[in-house]
Image (cartoon, rainbow, N blue to C red):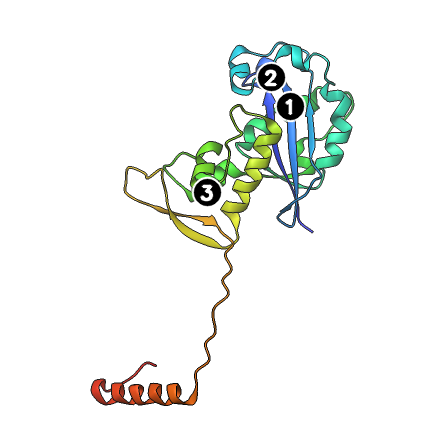
Amino acid sequence: MTRQIVLDTETTGLDPRDGHRIIEIGCVEMINRRVTDNYWHHYLNPEREIDAGAFEVHGISNEFVADKPRFAELATDFLGYVRGAELVIHNAAFDVGFLNHELSMLDGDRPRIEEICSVTDSLQMARQKHPGQKNNLDALCKRYSIDNSNRRLHGALLDSEILAEVYLAMTGGQTLLILDEERSEQGNESIVARVEVQHDLPLFEVDATDSAAHQDYLEFLRKTSGQSLW
């Protein structure tokens, strides 16, 4: 069984070294590349003010998180949920850095995320597949025809759900060449997106007269062209 957790966070600011904290964690579980309903999602009280710039990105206010649990109260449950899974994160260094900062502030000997999970950075994966192009989540949704119309502000759970679709599109399934709407300056490029198409091919029965006429036509082709591929 392959268990993957698509994870995203929202924070009070850009750098935990400046004392910034996590205010939302959203996780979506995939088992053998199928999304399950076993998700993990919580808002957190960061015990500090949210920067104005961060609020403009995610819209989560100081008032909203004031009565939410602190990370320390949910850490054991969170670690139990992700332990042993492969984490799929867009720009993993950012989220892993914040998670490890939160864990380092807890009492007792707490592991780093990399010690209990493997981590896959879907941003690095996208950059390898689409060099020289935009590879943020909105651009990837456009590239792979994934509906993100509900994504007016960043949100950890919504972004995890969208990233799960993007990741599945990038890493497998049937493919169909489509025109990239974000052509690079170097020229037109084709990309792939997952499609699931099934067609029932029609079957036709022919009688003896039609079959004989077909054979006569093939014989005519052999005599006139010297060979036949039918």
Decide if residue 14 is on the left or right side of residue 79: left
Q: Which residue is mark 3?
A: 144
Residue depicted at 52% across the width and 53% down the height:
173
Which secondary structure, mark 3?
loop
Nearest to the observer: residue 169 or residue 185: 169
Residue depicted at 52% across the width and 48% down the height:
171
Q: Amino acid at mark 2?
A: Ile
Where, quadrant-wise, is the C terminus in this rendering? bottom left
* Disc number placed over residue 24 in the picture, else none: 1
Q: Earlier in the sequence, mark 1 or mark 3?
A: 1
Q: Which residue is mark 2?
A: 60
Q: Could you give the CA–CA distance between mark 1 and mark 3, rounded to whole angstroms?
A: 27 Å
Residue depicted at 65% across the width and 27% down the height:
25
Q: Amino acid at mark 3?
A: Tyr
Does the residue at mark 2 contact the one at mark 1 (Cβ under 8 Å)? Answer: yes
Residue 112 in the image: state x and y as whole percent: 68, 30
- In the rendered image, the residue lying farthest to the left is 224
Q: Earlier in the sequence, mark 2 or mark 1?
A: 1
| Crowd tier of the residue under label 1, counting other residues whose Cα lies within 10 Å: few below 14, some 14–19, many 20 or above | many
Q: Amino acid at mark 1?
A: Glu
Q: Could you give the CA–CA distance between mark 3 and mark 2, rounded to whole angstroms?
A: 29 Å
| Crowd tier of the residue under label 3, counting other residues whose Cα lies within 10 Å: few below 14, some 14–19, many 20 or above | some
Which secondary structure, mark 1?
strand
The answer to which quarter of the image holds residue 129 is: top left
Q: Could you give the CA–CA distance between mark 2 and mark 1, rounded to whole angstroms?
A: 9 Å
* Disc number placed over residue 41 in the picture, else none: none
